[in-house]
Amino acid sequence: MRLRNVWVYGLGLALAATVVGCGGSQGTSSTSGSAASPAGAPAGMKVDIATAGNVTGSVMVDGAVPKNLAIKMNADPVCIKENSGVQLQETYVVGSDGKSLGNVFVYVKDGLGNYVFDTPTDMAHIDQKGCRYHPHVFGVRVGQPIEISNGDPTLHNIHALPKDNKEFNTAQPLKNMKIAHTFDKKEVMVPFKCEVHGWMNSYVGVLDHPYFAVTSDSGKFELKDLPPGTYTIEAWHEKMGTETQSVTLAAKETKDISFTFKAPAAPAN
């Protein structure tokens, strides 16, 4: 066991040295989450909370979703020790009613015009605990710092694979190691994976506004304090794709909407 620990530590240091050129952490941005206005143009509007409304809703699935795959953790005894019983992937999170769909990212895709929003200074968090990413799906703002931590006494690495932002791949060989990272462009969604434990994956939505949510196990979501207007709302699921709909919101109005994803066909025998 002692030889394994030495090997893991050495591998972690080597991997950290190898991947540091792939990105690593960036400084926290202090600029607005929206693009700057052209010279001479009026600054973007701030939302008047007194007239803002809300969009609430639910996400459902039509049909029976495939069973989540079992995770084989036997390659790393630390992962086995940190868990009990059979562990399953989080691809499909369905409520007790068999219809509600969790882990769906819901956000305002279009309609905010020239509204601008201050960049949050508080950190978002993703942890590697029990050889899983927590949370599996989450959202952050452009320029908002993300604290990435390793809660396990084993080597992890977090490899972000964006299309529009800068890729990074950082090793964390020791428990309680932390790094910080920010994304400087909006992008839905950015996948994360661990090169050491192939079953570990997560997704983050990066937006320049605060109107996003992740559905609970009961499929519920809420987008608070939206200014009056007409919006395209999109719901994203890692396997079933996206569904969109248009919503017109009057001052102080709350509207309830729902999305329904079609369950994927069962694989042929």
Image (cartoon, rainbow, N blue to C red):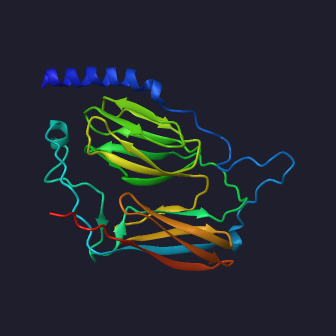
Q: Is residue 247 left or right of residue 133?
A: right
Q: Is residue 227 left or right of residue 68?
A: right
How many numbered discs?
Answer: 0
- Determine the image quadrant of residue 63: bottom left
Considering only vertical position in the picture, is 6 above or below 210?
Answer: above
Residue in the picture at 77% in, 49% down: 37
Q: Position of residue 138 (x, y in %)?
A: 44, 54
Pick the front one: 92 or 43: 92
Q: Is residue 148 left or right of residue 87?
A: right
Q: Position of residue 251 (x, y in %)?
A: 69, 77
Residue in the picture at 28% in, 77% down: 97
Pick the front one: 185 or 130: 185
- Determine the image quadrant of residue 260: bottom left
Which quadrant holds the N terminus? top left
Q: Position of residue 204 (x, y in %)?
A: 45, 50
Residue in the picture at 33% in, 47% down: 201
Q: Residue extending furthest right?
A: 40
Considering only vertical position in the picture, is 154 above or below 43?
Answer: above
Q: Residue extending furthest front?
A: 268
Which quadrant holds the C terminus? bottom left
Q: Position of residue 76 (x, y in %)?
A: 17, 36
